[in-house]
Image (cartoon, rainbow, N blue to C red):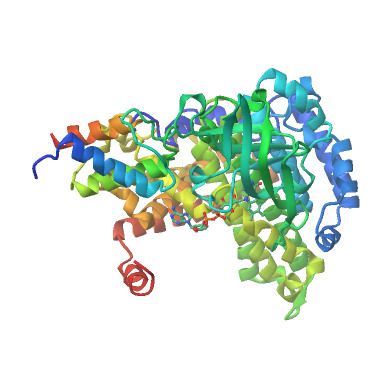
Amino acid sequence: MTAPSADILRNDVDEIIRRIRPDFKGEIKVTDRLREDIGLDSLHAMELLSAVTEKYELDVDIEEVQEVKTVGDVVQFLTTAMA
Amino acid sequence: MPGKTNLFTPILEAFRQIGPRLATSGRTQEEQEVVASILREVNRYCRKEVDGLAIDRRGALGQEMLDAVAERGWFGLTIPEEYGGAGLSMSAATRIATEICKYNGSLATCVALHSGLALYGLIHLASKDLQSRYLPEIAAGQRIAAFCATEPNAGSDIGSMRTLLYEQDGIFRLRGSKSYVTNGGFAGVLTVIASSPGLGGARGGHTMVVIDPSWTGVHKQAEENKLGLKGPSTITIDFDDVEVPRDHVIGEVSKGLDLAHEALTWGRSFMAAGCLGSAMAAVQEAREHIAGRVQFGRTLDQFPLVREQMAAAMADVYTVETVLRLVCDVFDSRSGDIALDSTVAKVLGSERAWNVIDRGLQLMGGAGFIEETGMPRRLRDVRVTRIFEGANDVLRLHLASATLGWPRAGLQEFPEVSPLVPAPLRTEAERFDEMLREVGVCLASIQKQYGFKLFQRQSLQSVMADAIMATYGMMAVLVRAAASVQDQDTPETCVELATAKLACKRLESEARLALQTMTRGADDEALTLANAVLAQ
Ligand SMILES: Cc1cc2nc3c(=O)[nH]c(=O)nc-3n(C[C@H](O)[C@H](O)[C@H](O)COP(=O)(O)OP(=O)(O)OC[C@H]3O[C@@H](n4cnc5c(N)ncnc54)[C@H](O)[C@@H]3O)c2cc1C
């Protein structure tokens, strides 16, 4: 599959975050921290990464994944995984 | 994600150092003496004054009992001495919680929740100023503590809470509602976690604050009508734009969710201590019953089936006690983060306590069903321990998902235990080494095979957690028993050896069953039925 643009990835990540946290108001920024800014706990963070890897049928070796703390990290992680 | 070590290696590396410490009730000789003296008083007071039937009938511990506990200093067990408390380590304080719970779950829950979950923030994270303002009165029992996280719409998904800490004209205010607050009705100090978007530069975030329930805007609702634990109050508390002085924030603004998890970590160890006490008392009562009750011309304890069931219950109690002691030791020696260890203690403790009490009740026959024997109350009281401070089902998911962060290399090779144990435990140790190797290989291959997709395989996660917990239990039992039976041949060590062997065998069977289930894969029949009858 051809890698989607960063904008599309951002949109997908936003959409998934809003599904997990329907109460979250306002714009989601790349600098937002998953925990402090969005209120996702470790299970939610897993759900998020699981949903994005599923959507793009990515086979990710978890050992390769560095700490994912912000929305930008998630997008970066996806971009790298698809490269 | 990677980088955190697994649950086993650090303990296996310190196998010989930890073992002897698990036999003692305190960190120092002096602490052990303090514990012994408190335990004597717990036994004296509870035997004479604590009437479980009466507590349940009135649906409250009653002011007289709370005063008696305060007078004896039991609300200050975990509070540092400089503030008038006993300053006990977790190892020591949990011993007291266990002892109280042998007599009554309601009283133990009140004291243990106060000492653990509710006071963690004030004792470990609050400013000196806040500590000196509150802790002396709390240690004296003039204020009893409660912890407020759960809300009508936020239970297991605690991050979705709506109670709001906001800033208005330079003043912090709290608005919202907290449910199922243990000790709530008589609490004199509350640790509250609230959502705090915008505060401390975080867009979302949560903050932990200390609230005095006498402040304007705090409203306590009516008592819940519960299945068990009738003694400690359980209520909803509403906060109507309560003004919160800034210095009542605990820790950093916006980091409250992490702090709440830390507090829960502490709390779960205290809960496991209570579970242990309930299970011990059930075993004791059932033993007395089967020794006296004659059927078919023999006392019940002469029947092999009864004897074996009793032995299994004793081995399970030993497992819970040992896991708890190990977790407390890791905490007290500051040798590691106990978030996952205390989860193991809580889940194993609550489930084994439930099973042991149920088995004890069964062995007592019809008498076990009669209130006056105390067994129905034990069963009712212990039931909630599988739900509160994290439903066990959800804790299993947390435990399994954490394994994704364990470095794979560490899962391929573990320090061996069999060369470290005395001869009588060699077989069990070899089995443990083999089991841990298998569990490690299995976890590593799941890591690789599923990655984040593991999230969608909840039943797989659940059995993974079972395998981890049972293997952890085996490890704990070996650490302790290896030290106790070393070069000793007393009647006590013979009993301990037999107990440890049976405990290992039972844990090994559980781990093996979990491994088989893991490798067998999805439960297709269950999925088919669920998909046919439940909304998609
Ligand atoms: C007597 C009592 C005292 C309490 N004391 C306190 C207290 O002092 N302070 C406090 O803050 N709270 C307290 N609680 C609340 C307690 O901690 C919560 O009840 C508990 O965390 C579970 O939340 P819930 O009841 O909303 O259940 P839910 O979150 O609705 O979960 C119900 C069930 O659904 C399943 N489930 C939930 N999420 C998932 C998932 N992601 N995947 C799969 N299955 C899932 C589990 O089987 C779970 O048991 C108390 C509760 C009781 C009953």
Q: Looking at the picture, how far across and down is residue A41, in whole percent?
A: 44, 40
Position of the C terminus of chain B, as image quadrant, is: bottom left
Q: Nearer the viewer, residue B223 or B22?
A: B223
Picture layout, residue A65 above or below residue A57 = above
The single residue placed furthest to the bottom in the displayed view is B296
Q: Nearer the viewer, residue B54 or B359?
A: B54
Taking the spot 71% from the left edge, 42% from the top edge, the residue there is B112
Q: Looking at the picture, how far across and down is residue B528, in whole percent?
A: 31, 71
The single residue placed furthest to the front in the displayed view is B169
Q: Is residue B216 left or right of residue B324?
A: right
Picture layout, residue B225 above or below residue B504 = below
Q: Is residue B486 left or right of residue B402?
A: right
Picture layout, residue B319 above or below residue B256 = below
Position of the N terminus of chain B, as image quadrant, is: top left
Q: Looking at the picture, how far across and down is residue A61, in whole percent?
A: 23, 38
Taking the spot 84% from the left edge, 45% from the top edge, the residue there is B43
The single residue placed furthest to the left in the displayed view is A2
Total numbered badges shown on the rendered structure: 0
Q: Nearer the viewer, residue B387 or A4?
A: A4
Q: Nearer the viewer, residue A75 or B415?
A: A75
Residue B446 in sight? no
Q: Is residue B98 left or right of residue B66?
A: left
